[in-house]
Image (cartoon, rainbow, N blue to C red):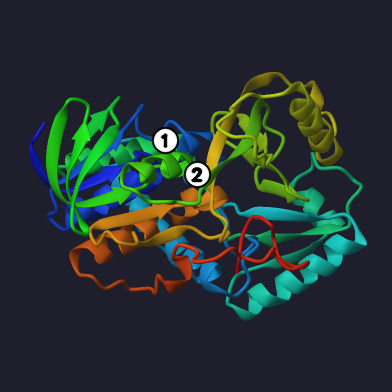
Amino acid sequence: MTKTTDVVVIGGGVIGSAIAWNLAEQQQQTLLVEKNQPGQEASAAAAGLLSVASGRSKRGPMYHLKRASQQLYPQLIRELEERTGIDIEYQTVGVLDLIRTDADEKKYRQLYELRREQGYPATWLSAEEVHRLEPALTTELRGAVHFPSDHHLHNGKLAEAWAQAAAQRGVILKTGATVSEARITGNKVTAVRIGDEWLSTNTVVIAAGSWSRQVGEIFGLTIPVEPAKGQMLAVRATPVRHVIAWDEHYLVPRKNGEVIIGSTVEFIGHNKDVTLETIRLFIERSEALVPGISKVPLSRFWAGLRPYSPTRRPILCRAPGLENVIIATGHHRNGIVLAPITGKLVSELITTGQTSMSLEPFALPREPLPPPAADESPDEAE
């Protein structure tokens, strides 16, 4: 391993890989450090949804960040697939948000009208129209809103392809390793210890997901990120073509015939156990949407740890008191959709000091934040 590098990126999920990929394009010698294998934690555990029109953020900074990131995906997918030969399974059929209750109808009528004003394609479907698109769905629904611009992909293959493509651009991957110490002179980190070796560096990026708090402590930083467990499962069935969503529950079809079902949000530390109670809950909810799905074979089950920030937004900023340390974490349930723009903005911050979008809304919180309003998501700020 080289003894000197321009940038050390700590964390090899899609966020770290996106940052390293962009830095390498700007001729920055970059080392990507990952304690396991790239993309095998939260990045591999996600469902791969690129949801903006159907998402919770309506008009604010999170909405604009997600929209900008989603727009980067088509070209990115083409380049990653051409470079690596990996089929990322980018699917463009869109999301069907089901309408089953009065509350659903009110919520989605408002969202439908807003998204049409914002220029998104959206179609309000009757129950009959929904069943023509998805015959396997329950008859107990009033209709749905179709958001065709919200695509999905195979997040595990995306993570694999991004890490490979970054390496092709010259990024050095250091796997099975961690940063354990830092040398700090004044307000700058001058070197980090990886394993038994010290490496001099100009910049450090902390992109360690739900372990960012622990990594921050190495640099004397308090990064208020905690793990939010999401349990998921997959069944071997092909009853749906679109992403089907209702009341925080979703079914995501994959090209191999699996349907991904999820997900929970649990704050119980670094615990990745899957419980029978949650599996039963998924079965009940899925059966209510797709009758008969409970009888198909169970393929696999797992849990991932998403990095949750108290700001309910990602934290993208320079570390307080350390001018050459960048924090890029706290993406929670939006890591996949926000990876391209995160990589772009962090690279801009390091190489030019200026970013093409303001990072002010994504700073570290200076004081405790109030709880979300009644009409806001507890998971995601505007």
Q: Quadrant of residue 103?
A: bottom right
Using residue 191 as the reference point, say whether residue 233 is left or right of it.
right
Say few, some or many: other residues with alpha carbon within 10 Å of mark 2 (under 14 / 14 to 19 / 20 or more). many
Q: Which residue is painted at 31% across and 71% down in the image? A: 355
- CB-based contact (under 8 Å), mark 2 and mark 1: yes
Q: Quadrant of residue 8?
A: top left
Using residue 250 as the reference point, say whether residue 68 is left or right of it.
left
Q: Nearer the viewer, residue 23 or 365?
A: 365
Point out the image quarter for the C terminus: bottom right
Give percent across and percent down for residue 346. 31, 60
Using residue 121 as the reference point, say whether residue 247 is left or right of it.
right
Q: Amino acid at mark 1?
A: Lys
Say few, some or many: other residues with alpha carbon within 10 Å of mark 1 (under 14 / 14 to 19 / 20 or more). some
Q: Amino acid at mark 2?
A: Leu
Question: At numbered mark 2, what does the secondary structure look like: helix, strand or loop?
Answer: loop
**For mark 2, what is the residue?**
153
Point out the image quarter for the N terminus: top left
Vertical arrangement, residue 282 with respect to residue 81, above or below: above
Vertical arrangement, residue 293 with respect to residue 247, above or below: above
Distance CA(mark 2)–CA(mark 1): 8 Å
Residue placed furthest toward the bottom: 117
Question: At numbered mark 1, what does the secondary structure look like: helix, strand or loop?
Answer: helix
Numbered mark located on residue 157 in the image: 1
Vertical arrangement, residue 9 with respect to residue 362, above or below: above
Residue placed furthest toward the front: 186
Give percent across and percent down for residue 301. 63, 24
Residue placed furthest toward the left: 3
Q: Is residue 374 visible?
A: yes
Give percent across and percent down for residue 247. 78, 51
Q: Which residue is painted at 59% across and 63% down in the image? A: 368
